[in-house]
Image (cartoon, helix red, strand yellow):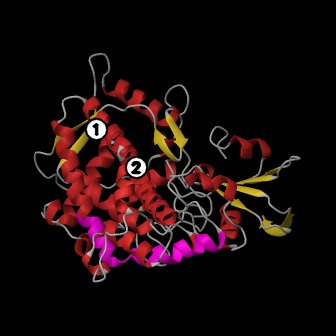
Amino acid sequence: MDKDMASPFHVAGADTVIAVSPTRNVIHTCDPAVTTQIFRRSNFRKPAELIELLNVFGPGLTGSEGPEGRLYRKVTAPFFTEQTMDQVWNTSIESIGALMQSLVAAQQPSELLQQSERERRSLRSIMASMTLHNVFTNTTTTTTLSACAKLSYLLFQARLPPPAISGNIFAFLFAGHEANANTLTIAVFLLALHPSIQSSLQHTIDVHLANCPPKNSTYTTHYPLLKDSLVAAVINETLRLFTILPFLPKTTPEFPSSITVKGRTHVLPPNTLVLINTSATHRHPAYWPAPEAPRHGSAPYPVSSFNPGYWLQPQPGGGDFLRPQPGSFVPFSEGGRGCLGRQFAMVELCAQLAGIFSDWSVELVQDGTLGWEGAKVRAEQVLSEGVVFDMTLRPTEMVPVRFVRREAKTGPKPLVGLKRRCGNQ
């Protein structure tokens, strides 16, 4: 285990450690086998004292546990239908087209930042308008509604109290917008840092869209082609290195329980906090490629490890897209209580990447004092040292990039070379 990225595990010489204190015991783990056990135990719950912070506008799915959490999950699960995914694809293509026009037309980045801040301040009024009880009539059906309105309709139909309606709407807006926006931003930065991977991605999009303009693409025709291609590999690799949450918290029951670690059973005290370290899990050298040696200063670990081609491997059971060992890739959690929006996120990100890189290329901005290498070093440092966690993992500093319209579709490009298989894969 790399000592910089997983120092507690490196110091302990183990993938699962427990910190014992008079106030509370805390387990830290990056062991996929342990993680899988924890996710599959129904009595390992989310710690209420931590997740309640997510209930900004009222109780919601992400910030609730027990019977209340199960109710919200049951009510919102019907939202994730194929009809919804079709709407997600179309909306994503439309919105990314409008965004690209704004980005290219903007003279000053500050204009976009000021616009974003105004939109953030208006969130409360947006939430209020979405939770009005007179939105729907007795003849309303889910087939006639947009994706967002359909979610509201399901919450109203369940006769949830207003705080629970607004809380769940906010939870889905936050998860669907904030997390995906950060993932898309970082993916664009990584592709600017790796022009050869970007070129391969564009070729993959050209092949699968087959001269179809993004605005005419469809979920049923094009998403099945992209979801096991280099497009999805770029998304997964971005999520592996810059996962949505750097840790996933759980709590053991109010009675002794047990887990098996390296073949040995260990009894856990009641109410032990368990922190699944997703960042360390996604970099574990037994399951993932080792990073390249740093070229300068402190290691730009996530950037040097970026290799979407690793996901494009023939699988023993068939197919050419990597199926990671259970517990080793958990950006959306796992098990029966995994994230309901996993496919939603993948559909949205696939559509957005296809919409951008079908017509555009992204490149690092080289100012008067920085050449390509200097701009790359600066960007690597931002993505290695300037990424923080405040509700989600996101960069806090700017990586200057510019979008350039592709003049012509490129010919065939070789896919990214695969690094060696690691550990038991």
Tell me if residue 334 comes above or below residue 74 in the rendering: above
Residue 71 appears in which quarter of the rendering?
Answer: bottom right
The x and y percentages for residue 422 are 58, 57
Q: What secondary structure is marked by label 2?
A: helix
Q: Nearer the viewer, residue 16 or 337?
A: 337
Residue at image point 35% right, 53% down:
126
Going by the numbered disc 1, the residue's amino acid type is Gln
Residue at image point 54% right, 33% down:
299
Magenta stretch: helix, strand or loop mostly: helix
Q: Is residue 138 left or right of residue 327?
A: left
Residue at image point 69% right, 66% down:
45
- On whether residue 85 falls in the magenta region, the answer is yes
The x and y percentages for residue 278 are 60, 53
Q: What secondary structure is marked by label 1?
A: helix
Q: Nearer the viewer, residue 423 or 284?
A: 284
Q: Is residue 212 left or right of residue 424?
A: left
Tell me if residue 188 comes above or below residue 322 in the rendering: above
- Which region of the structure is painted magenta? 66-90
